[in-house]
Amino acid sequence: MEFLIFSTLAAAFYFLPSIIGLRKRNAGAIFVLNLFLGWTVIGWVVSLVWALTNEGVVTPIVVQANIQPSPPVCSTCHAPVRASDVFCTRCGNKIGWPVSQRTLA
Ligand SMILES: [Zn+2]
């Protein structure tokens, strides 16, 4: 019984770096280092330090698409219209300009 308790505690201590680094991005690598080189005290210390290292803030990369505003078109016939137009040149429909679109064009 004592042997079982001792070996459980020893295994828990041996895999302490893996347990600490469980939620790290490199959890798998930390575990492998801990498993294969943990017996060489240096490997254990390195994996422990690795497990304790702050990963820092992962900065999200924001890619901003350069979206060109679509050219204004008539809502009835979809013919291109100019900002200065009040009526569509093709169908004669009165163009209801949204204020923002008029300033864009
Ligand atoms: Zn039209």
Image (tube, grey):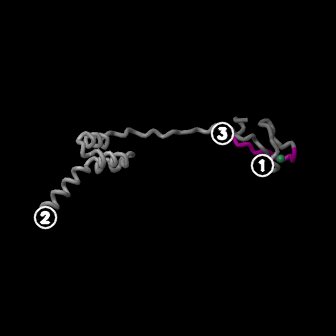
* Residue for badge 1: 75
Is disc 2 in contact with disc 3, using a CB cutoff of under 8 Å?
no
* Residue for badge 2: 1
Q: Most extreme residue toward the left, as rendered?
A: 2
**Numbered disc 1: secondary structure:** loop
Q: Position of residue 82 (x, y in %)?
A: 79, 37
* Residue for badge 3: 67
Q: Which residues are magenta?
A: 90-100
Disc 2/disc 1 C-alpha distance (Å): 84 Å
Q: Which mark is residue 57?
A: none
Left or right: 47, with 6 as reference point: right
| 84, 66: nearer the viewer | 66
| 15, 81: nearer the viewer | 15
Residue at 23% across, 50% down: 14
Q: Position of residue 22 (x, y in %)?
A: 33, 50
Q: Amino acid at mark 2?
A: Met
Disc 2/disc 3 C-alpha distance (Å): 70 Å
Q: Amino acid at mark 3?
A: Ile
Q: Is residue 18 above or below residue 67?
A: below
Residue at 73% across, 35% down: 105
Q: Most extreme residue toward the bottom, as rendered?
A: 1
- 80 falls in the magenta region: no
Instruction: Tell which circle, 2 or 1, labels the residue nearer the N-terminal end.
Output: 2
Q: Position of residue 34 (x, y in %)?
A: 29, 47
Which quadrant does the N terminus fall into? bottom left
Q: Amino acid at mark 1?
A: Ser
